[in-house]
Amino acid sequence: MPIEHPYLMFLGDVPDQLAAKTASGIVDWRPEWCLGQLRLPGCRADLGLPDLTIPEAKHKGARTLIVGVVNAGGVLPAHWIETIVAALEAGLDVASGLHTRLGDQPAIAQAAAAHSRQLFDVRHSGQRFATGKGTKRSGRRLLTVGTDCSVGKKYTVLALERGMRARSFDADFRATGQTGVFISGRGVAIDAVVADFISGAVEWLSPAADPTHWDLIEGQGSLFHPSFAGVSLGLLHGAQPDAFIVCHEPTRTHMRGVEHPLPSIGEVIDLTIRCGRLTNPAIRCAGIAINTQALSESDAKALLGATSAEHGLPATDPVRFGVDDLIDRLVEEFGLLPGSAPAA
């Protein structure tokens, strides 16, 4: 996807850090692409980048304004349009991961045309997908699943890709959300695919491969989330995973955006296996990834140790403590051997 960087990250006036997770993900995994941030009054997110105006960012060499936020329904607030138009008028392209298409807003479309700028809606693919078939295909696949939304599914597979390649394993990150597409430059935002074609889109994204190759597929939502379980189930069936990692955030008392309580890690393991057996009868859990950002190091290590003992699986915080234990489990379970890793 030819989105030119450096980027000016637009955060609007989002109410918390998690609402800027698209921008945060890009900054965490592609910091060299990110020049600064633009925040409106009342914004409660901070990427740790310099605060720049549009003219300042243009002067410093910014090429694209990234709308780096998420919200329920992926809508573009009307009061952000003025800023996006100003960026186009200043000579920046604009890219967004929202469901709302930039070009559907007349003011934005007119400004882009008038100033010969490009609009990128990474959540919307021009690819046509078949329905899923559930036919066994060669290669190995790992999927991250969650007790909730926004618990670390993307970061876990990105950390696994980095760790596995460092140990000369043949592994590729497969993006299924807008942030992952921004990071990798390829993928499919599964939640924007018509429901009948979700599993087929994942089959397209992770086709037959060499028997030693691992596709590390980014999970979405949760099978227990009343808003997004449909996406999660279609993704599970299309991924046809040999292994899955359960991702969890331990300080939450209910699922994000709804009043439903979080399921236990054990409940997620059991339901994922029951549902996943439809397309891979040999599906199994290979570990647990816990986002311990809100915990002290000692508390984090104690929680990980207790969780590992409870479930008989390796448990780690992939960002804080690495993924070697998860990779070791894949070696143990699947006879994974180093091969010719692809170029980074």
Image: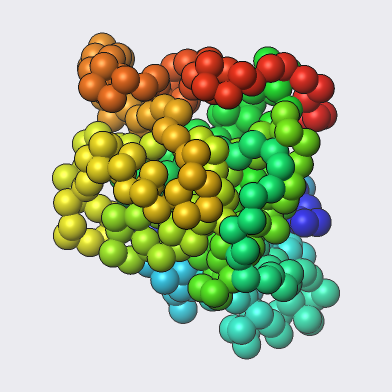
Closer-to-camera residue (274/264): 274
Residue situated furthest bottom in the rendering: 106
Percent x, y of residue 80: 50, 71
Residue situated furthest front in the rendering: 281
| Colour approach in the figure | rainbow
Tell whether 44 sits left or right of 69: left
Residue in view at x 52 percent, y 47 percent = 280
Residue in view at x 68 percent, y 54 percent = 205
Residue in view at x 42 percent, y 33 percent = 285
215 w.r.t. 74: above or below = above
Residue in view at x 35 percent, y 55 percent = 223
Tell whether 313 sits left or right of 143: left
Closer-to-camera residue (258/325): 325
Closer-to-camera residue (265/75): 265
Percent x, y of residue 253: 16, 45
Q: Quadrant of the N terminus?
A: bottom right
Q: Quadrant of the C terminus?
A: top right
Percent x, y of residue 240: 56, 49
Percent x, y of residue 239: 57, 50
Query: Residue 343 lies in what quarter of the image?
Result: top right
**Disc count in the image?**
0
68 w.r.t. 286: above or below = below
Residue 86 in view here: no
Residue 191 in view here: yes
Query: Residue 340 lies in what quarter of the image?
Result: top right
